[in-house]
Image (cartoon, helix red, strand yellow):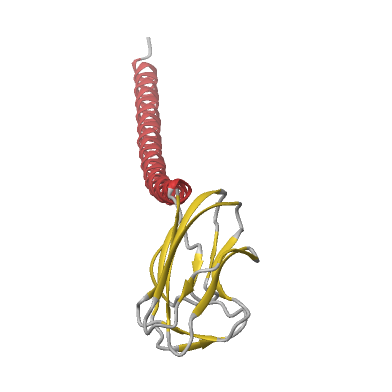
Amino acid sequence: MDVSSMNEQLQEFIQKEINVSCNTYIQREMNEKKIVTGLHNLNTTFEEMFETLTRNTDNGFEMLSKSFEQEIKTLIREEIKHNVRGTEKDSHPAFLAIWTEDTVTLRRNDIIKFNHVVTNVGNGYSPMTGKFKAPKQGTYFFGGTVVSAPPNALHMMLMKSGTSIMIPYASVTQGDSYTFTAVLQLKAGDTVYIQKDNRVEKAYGRDHSTFSGFMI
């Protein structure tokens, strides 16, 4: 057997094994590096996804919170409106107005405008016109006082939508007054007021002449 030839073959085998081992090691290292890099990239991707999800969730909760708050405010406003409408619907109209002017000459068909409004539930009475306008149908009680001023008596009329109901009268005596009451059936929109007849006479205010009414 040729020893020299065997030695060469042995060296070739050893070198081949070394090369295979080195290549295997290098390949394994490269694969591990790829795996580590992949895991790192995957971890980064998950972190970005989590951050985005958290941010979107926070924004979502914030938007939901604002929407819920707005909804609550709307419900509260609607409830307040409903309660106010219910209160107005259930309340009975009522008013009291006082005439504060001094001696005034009243001419034919003049309406006394009781200018100082003390009570006006339902806003049926207008101090600008002196008329009470029924907000709703029903039976109403009215009362009032008119005071005369010399040198004449005072003839007034309690009017319902243009029709005379009664004629309160105060004599010539200084500061004489006439107090009246009436119960009237009204439709919504009917008006009640105190109007001068066809005479020209003087009337006295100064908080002594009053006009009031309420729904029974």
Task: Measuring from the top left, give residue 24's x and y in whole percent.
Answer: 38, 26
Between 128 and 204, the one lying in front of the other is 204
Task: Measuring from the top left, give residue 72's x and y in whole percent.
Answer: 40, 46
Q: Can the viewer see residue 151?
A: yes
Residue 44 quadrant: top left
| Above or below, comparing residue 120 to residue 1 in the picture | below
| Above or below, comparing residue 173 to residue 122 in the picture | below
| Above or below, comparing residue 102 to residue 58 in the picture | below
Tell me if 209 is positioned left or right of 157 in this view: left
Task: Measuring from the top left, give residue 121's x and y in whole percent.
Answer: 42, 59
Between 64 and 190, the one lying in front of the other is 190
Task: Measuring from the top left, give residue 169's x and y in whole percent.
Answer: 49, 72
Q: For the point 39% across and 19% down, which residue is it?
A: 9
Looking at this view, name the residue that lies furthest to the top. Answer: 1
Q: Can the viewer see residue 211?
A: no
Between 90 and 76, the one lying in front of the other is 90
Tell me if 116 is positioned left or right of 199 in this view: left
Q: For the point 58% across and 80% down, which residue is it?
A: 110
Looking at this view, name the residue that lies furthest to the right. Answer: 162
Q: For the point 35% across and 36% down, which residue is it?
A: 36
The N terminus appears in which quarter of the rendering?
A: top left
Between 173 and 115, the one lying in front of the other is 173
- Counting every numbered tag in the picture gives 0
Residue 117 quadrant: bottom left
